[in-house]
Amino acid sequence: MNYLDFTGVLSRSDLLLNGLVLTAQISVAAMVIALVIAVVAATLSLNERRVVRLPVLAYVEVIRNTPFIVQVFLIYFGLPALGLRLEPITAAIVAMSIYGGAYCSEIIRAGIQGIAKGQIEAGRALGMSPLTIFRHIVLKPAVASVFPSLVAQFILLLLSSSVVSAISVPELTGTGNDIQGLTLRNMEIYLVIAVIYVALVAILKGSMTVLERVLFPFKFLRR
Amino acid sequence: MFQQYSLAHVQFMLTGLGWTVTLALIALVGGSIAGSVLTLMRVSSNAILSRIAQFYIFVVQGTPLLVTLFIAYFGASYVGFAVQPLVAIAVAFSFYAAAFLGDIWRGAIQSVPGGQHEGAHALGLSRVAAMRYIIIPQAIRIATPPTVGFFVQLIKNTSLASVVGIVELTRTAQIVSNATFKPLEVYLTAALFYFLVCFPITLFSRRLEKRLNV
């Protein structure tokens, strides 16, 4: 057995930091876009017209039943055949958003279905506009109730960002592959990267707990 | 210069699909064994065992599977095991699956109503007997749909083994794509294969959920 030697890896910590920043950037961008896709998809999937519902359900099922890396390859290598050539980072954010959107839409749909009908009727009786009802009576309590599931999905999205290293995006795992080529210290670099990801997950979890208290203070009222 | 995308390529990808399913099944079996141990540690009254299992689950669930695979791939030779990459990767998938199955099954055991424990106690059953005859049979019913659902995740995630050179479905697609330069058609075929395997299992998991829960 060889001894672990982290000096070579740690002397490239500036590279690692760049990778970490890029991982955070593409992950946050994908989370935001995925959430927008999810709200739209969840709303459409509850539409009473089949023509509206079916394409959305097809989107969700196709994305959820095929591997993320194949989706990434289709967007990055496949789309140019249709005349759409994306930069690696753009392709990564697009793929992650589409992927995350499908999973989050199922979560948000469950949240919306959990809203009692009487709430909406009460909103109508108070003379609220349909948009106001949707925003304040349907969407906000729905997101509040499924927030923990959304956070779990965001964590999976953050971790899935490592896959886009396969299309040469220099995020954390991609940087790790580069440093591995430079130092040949393969074991050390991937151990360091694993620790960084675990820390990122812990930070994401912590900040989401704070965000939950800020966005949905009514969840924490004492009765 | 480039080969024509043909039926022979599709057949080659079908052999890759065979390896995808094989790898997922190995991970399911290996993960079930290690996952059972983790579950028992998690629900045991020994706080240290429970904490160790909790920490293991936290670390594995907080590391991207791709990085776990790299560690297994390089780590096997690092600690002096001269094993095939396929073996190292199968072991890594089992450890990965164990973390998720351990979590799913702990949740199932804990969602068996407390009255069942009390009833078993009142009947004079020992802790082990209560687990064996009262709690676990009910927990298995609760745990089956999410376990089947996780198997779909496992099948999809074996695609990451392509990055470390295991020739499963995604890797065969890459090879064919490079040979034919028809990435759109080739990856769509691969996606279709995954969908045809995963979607029925997803539907099955949902049917189980409906039948067992409500």
Image: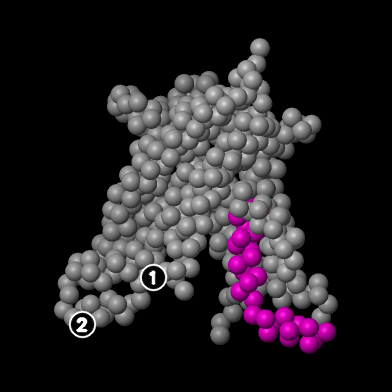
Q: What stretch of residues is rendered in magenta?
A: A100-127
Q: Amino acid at mark 1?
A: Ser
Judging by the rendered image, the residue that carries numbered circle 1 is B111
Say whether residue A73 is left or right of residue B97. Answer: right
Say whether residue B95 is left or right of residue A64. Answer: left
Q: Quadrant of residue A84?
A: top right
Q: Quadrant of residue A92?
A: top right
Where residue B183 appears, x then y in whole percent?
65, 29
Q: Dot 2: what SS? A: helix
Asked whether the residues under marks 2 and 1 belong to the same chain, the reply is yes
Q: Dot 1: what SS? A: loop
Specify the subunit that label 1 lies on. B
Please tell me which residue lies in front, B55 or B40. B40
Please tell me which residue lies in front, A40 or B127. A40
Say whether residue A139 is left or right of residue B157. Answer: right
Where residue B54 appears, x then y in whole percent?
37, 56
Where residue A202 appears, x then y in whole percent?
51, 52
